[in-house]
Amino acid sequence: CSDDYLDKEIYGRKSTEEFYKTDQDAFRATIAIYDILQYHYNTGWSSNYLVKTLPSDEGTAGGGGSGDQPQYQNLDDFAYDSQNGGVLGTWRMAYFGIFRANKVINLVEPENDFRKTLIAEAKALRAYNYFELVSMFGDVPMILTEPDQSEYEQVRVASSIVYDQIEKDLREAIELLPLKSEYGAADQFRVSKGTAQALLGKAYLYQQEWDSAAYFLDAVITSNQYDLHDNYADNWTEAGELGKESVFEVQFVSSVGYDWGNFPWDNGRLQESNIHIQLMGSRGGFYEPAPGDSLIAGWGFLYPSEKIYNVFVNAGDSVRKVNTLMSEAELVAAGGAWNGENVWDYNGFIRRKYGTYSNQTNADAVAELNYATNWRLIRYSDVLLMAAEAFYNAGDEGRARTELNKVRDRADLDDVVATGNDLFEAIVTERQLELAFEGFRFLDLIRWGRGSQELGDLGFVEGKHNLFPIPFDDVVRGNLSQNDKW
Amino acid sequence: QDRQVSGKVLDTETNTALPGVSIIVKGTSTGTTTDIDGNYSLQVPEENTTLIFSFIGYATEEINIQNRSVVDVSLTTDVTALSEVVVIGYGEQQKSLLTGAISSIEAEQITNTSTLRVEQALQGRTAGVNVLANSGSPGSGLKVRIRGTGSNGDSGPLYIVDGIRTGGIEYLDPSEIASIEVLKDAASAAIYGAEGANGVVLISTKTGKAGKPQINYNFQYGIQTVGDRMEMMNAQQYAEYLNEAGASGTLPDPADFQGVKGTDWLDELFESAPLQKHSLNLSGGSENSTYLVGGSFYTQDGVAGGDKAQFDRYTARLNSDHQVKDWLKVGNRLSYSHFKRSTIAEDDEFGSVVGNAILMDPTTPVIYTDGLPAHAQAALDAGETLTKDDDGNYYGISRYVQGEIGNPLAMIQNTRGEIVQDKIVGNIYAELTPIKHIKFTSRFGIDAAFQLNHEWFPSYYFSNERKNNTPTVRDNNEKWFTTQWENFATYTNSIAEHDFSILLGTSAINTVYNKLNGSGGPMFDEDDKFAYYDYIPDESDRIGSTREDKSLLSYFGRVSYTFSDKYLLNATFRYDGSSLLPDGNRWDLFPSVSAGWVVSAEDFFPEAFINFLKVRASWGENGNLRSLTPGQYASIITTQGIRYPTGTGGFYVGAEPDFLPNPDLVWETSEQIDLGLDFGLLDDQLRVTVDYYNKTTKGLLTASTPPHYIGNDGATVNGGDVRNKGFEFEVAYSKSAGDFYYEISANMTTVDNEVVYLNPLVPDKIQGAGVGTGWTASYFEEGLPIWYFRGYKTDGIFQNQEQIDNYISQNGITEYSPVPGDPVVMDINNDGRITPEDQTYIGDPHPDFLYGGRVNVGYKGFDLTVFLQGSKGNDILMGFNRTDRGTVNKPEFFYKDRWTGEGSTNDWFAADTDNPYVYNSDLMVFNGSYARIKQLQLGYTLPENLINRLKFNSVRVYVSLEDYFTFTKYPGLDPEAGSNDDNSQGIDRGVYPIPKKFMTGLSLSF
């Protein structure tokens, strides 16, 4: 006998050396980078959408009780620590995306235009993930090639250097990426030139490099690839997904038809539906929809705060309010009911944006498990508001008002004519209204230096909560330094 | 002048003829053997007057025949334990000459127990072996730990049945077994090298004996019940407790439940359930050919779930041996088994039936017999499917308990599924003795199992979080096929006082695993007959399949040398190669050496009351690869599950490396030393064995946990070292006087388990199992026992605000605001805050020692057996509580023992449903020590004169109480029932308790 007896096929797998060779390999490796964007339910409930939303003043954690998904309860209460599972999930998701992007960037030979475009796509996605990290955690390890086992211990790189890399990747990507209109219907989810420009503009905005931010955000506006939906509500229908207002979205579908037996719990790689929508529906048993309302019950997370409701009321913004939230009184008036007393973390308001709409799930399968609702990562209205802010800070108040008023017009609100600080305040309020519950508010408040002002009574500590803690696991495993006060 | 001597050889006990008995004229090489009827005849030289009668398993007799010409002899079974022959790997050895630590269990010890599985027969019967039931449900598995938990993943021993390595021994009925040997030290197991690290269990099945054909029949019938149950809060207590605790959600008003007991869900869940077993063996043979044909049938219902938790097993066996020529013997061992197991969900604090019976609120009725309450009617009106019982009544759904918790009886009603397995294990062999002293054996075996798990899920509604409106069907079709070919040669010789034997051999094992699974729905209609994919719209079928191949190639050898039956030496090597390791790391050598000295054989040894004394020592290394599946070292590209929806309704396939590579992966090896002493006292009536062992598992295989920023899951790595050490004692005393005999035996094992090294590639603490409160409760960390419990350490209960203020100021603690009635949480890291970093060791599931004891008493036809087994020093973590579902029920002692005001108690907290300092703390860790009378059996063997008239050889009837009496302080359902997962050992998620059994039985042989 010889060693041949021990040479066994490894079924269903290819070696790394055999892969990354053909156009198809390159395409599949690129799709894998997108796949990780669905990874909100990676190891338990750890959506970075909720990680970025719960510390804000938009809502409360909710759920079944104070012990239900403690990682989310703690984020809501500013009681999270470096061992928070949601914070870890966010960190992990970004680095898993970076790992996959690095594979394409480093191992695919740019032999033809098709592959060059894929590499550009991978660079844009790598930049997106590094931006997530740097905006939430500050200095982070920057990994551009796969380290050996002996090099697993890394150091945190200054955020300015990470931003330099983000800018470099995005500039290279912008050169090669197609316009959104150049992608076919099946490929509308892919990163286009406009996506990369918007990301780069946002990266400059966060660094307060106003001219550069304005330049790249304006490039998106002048590209004529995007426009606002006439109707704000169209953003939140399934039909409106990947539409003209969509700059970047994470795709989810209901067609897989999961049931309780085959739902891939604890396996983020396999997720194709957005289970967090079910988690974030008003809690069944208490919530009873009004007749004809397709907003059905869920598991009760992320109830709106009274504060955000009042912002809509004070702004006289009814168009966006009905698409964002409703009060219990409005629910009852419409013929629905709220049958609970003493309900955990419930403030008397029900969220409709990213709601549990019966027409966004699969009626032929288990409805709870099959929400097709996409996460909207960048909408054109966000680009306009970011541009307004950049122009304002760059000294072009005219352009700032122009872009701001495009958004207000669509919401049937009067044009803003304010100048100076009032104009800036108008932009701040507009972002709060237009983008409520989309995961931007908390980071906006941080970069505007308004954490203490708006969140102080919720437990925000200046100098501590400005950054998320470096996950404990990696402080231990990688010997990383920790952020201040954590 | 020779003379003719003839006669007949009989068995003393059964009075049956013994064929094949060897008869030698002492001092000569003249001899013969008895024929099929036990008769012999031989020529004896005139000057010789002594004949030696010998037969394996019987005491050798030397008879002075004087001038008789007819000499009838009765041989007695050799009961002297020290002269027993025990099976060792690829051979046999006289027990008195063993140099390793091997424990034996004889067939008669296990025949008359209600045990379904052979592993159970190991429990408490021998030192060094810990048997942990995964659950008390019919057909559930057991974990066997030989000398502690050595590995991170699978720490089970290697099972060798008649020379065939088998995946498990669940297919064997105890009636098939002739003997079990447990190889505990490294030197004994070293002949199995690569896979012997967690010990080896060698099982020999029964074979036929030449002579009159025998028929043995055994019958057992038993009733199982659940004994002293944990009491849960009744409706009144429940309502008061929740309100006192200020639980969130809709709460019951205590005023509505004054004096109301409500539903006792555990009482409703558990029922008495039958079990029944039949086994039949036919055996016999001639001088040259023997056979055994046997079969058994076993059926058991569950004490929870009844026939929805049923286990049925059929086994059939054909063993035969043929001496074809003087130099050639061939034979086979062949067994077929078929089992069918229905299971209800268990070992889970989220969805299991027993877990839900604990958590379900007592105000909800089992069924609604008098109309539906509003909340149930509302669900019905909303189009939900409420489960009905067989009489058409709706099962109760809770108004207060939400989440995934449902009515456990409705869950049983909804359980539709079974696992069916067919398995063939067997071998054919040939033994050649071409020349004197040399025996060559070739053995080819297979272990083939085919299993189908078919289940379907009807529509149901328990709550908004636990409902199903899409009936779906699921199948999992698995096939394991292992072939094993072994060839080995033994050279045995004696020269003067030197006895030696040399073994050399090879083994080649190839395993293929195939899986085909599918799921689909919605079903055409909710019925068994529609639970097949052809009746489901094609677009919603899903199908999957996988395959895994692996192989193991081995070369082995052993030298045994004995001088004058006093000085014993053994050396073993095994050289193994596995396909599971990367090229270059595939092969490894596993050596061992052991030595013994029979002190009592020395001339200087006084003829005192110690009649036998042996000291022995061994050292060796073994391997383990059990936790590995193919390709775990390589960075390999997969497309599994990686797809992304396109904008037009389809999917694009993605591909990426499954995990990070680890080209350095090597065998997990265990190194062990063993020092032992064997005594025989009072003419061997008292036998004592003492062993000290120290076993270190090195390079334990574990999933590596690189920093998350590396961007992928880690490969399997050699993660750390675990050390188990301790002492083992076995004592047995037997005596008979006239019609009276008794046997007493006892054993005890101490285990000291510690993780002694962690690979820098893994973090300083590996996280283990989480429980339903969102708490990672078990950890793997250097300097502590494997999978110890980690949580908050408490120091009594705060009695008043002053005490709280003092505690906070004295310790300089901030951001911590307990109230009176909360536990005093200790700031372990002294950082002035109470954070998860204060969690620390609060217990571990490993016993300090295990013990077992057995007393057998017989008088005339009566026999009585008492068999006790226990463990001491292990902890149990009460893990079924849920803090995320504030309104779930709790054990009654949570209510009765609670803090109710200053000075009421310093041991138990005030009513509380969600405080992590309560539920993630040492308050949930309990002493898990227990002692259980596994068997109390009274039997009666009918007198010979009666049964002879009935043409029987023997008839025995008995009654038996099994697992009937348990002594423990653990307040949960069962201190013994454990868990499927290694890192969940000792965590009680609402275990399926081990039932008490009242058994009656009958054994016939004729």
Image: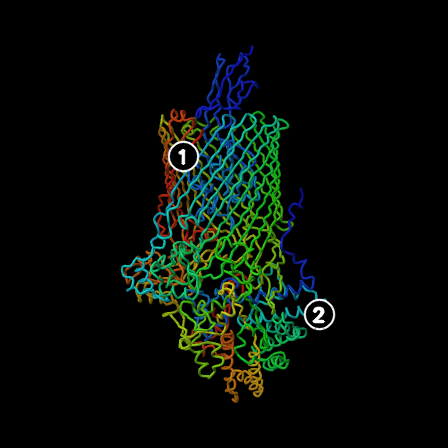
Q: Amino acid at mark 1?
A: Leu
| Badge nearest the viewer, 2 or 1 | 1
Residue corresponding to mark 1? B1002
Task: Residue B947 in the image: state x and y as whole percent.
Answer: 40, 27
Q: As drawn, which residue projects farthest toward the top?
A: B1
State whether residue A433 appears in this view: yes
User: B43 above or below A235?
Assistant: above
Distance between the Cα atoms at labels 2 and 1? Answer: 83 Å
| Residue pictured at 53% horizontal, 74% vertical | A237
In this rendering, the count of numbered labels is 2
Task: Point out residue A53 in the picture as x, y percentages from the top left corner.
Answer: 49, 72
Q: Residues within 10 Å of mark 2 (few under 14, many from 20)?
A: few
A407 up-or-down from B511: above or below:
below
> Relative to residue A363, is residue A423 depicted above or below?
below
**Do discs 2 and 1 belong to a common subunit?**
no
Quadrant assignment for the N terminus of chain A: top right
Residue under numbered circle 2 = A113
Decide: is A345 above or below B633. below
Mark 1 — on which chain does it sit? B
Question: Which is more toward the observer, B461 or A11?
Answer: B461
Q: Helix or strand or loop: what does disc 2 sit on?
A: helix
Task: Choose top left, top right, bottom left or bottom right for residue B535.
Answer: bottom right
Please indicate, yes or no, whether residue B792 appears anywhere in the rendered image. no
Q: Secondary structure at mark 1?
A: strand
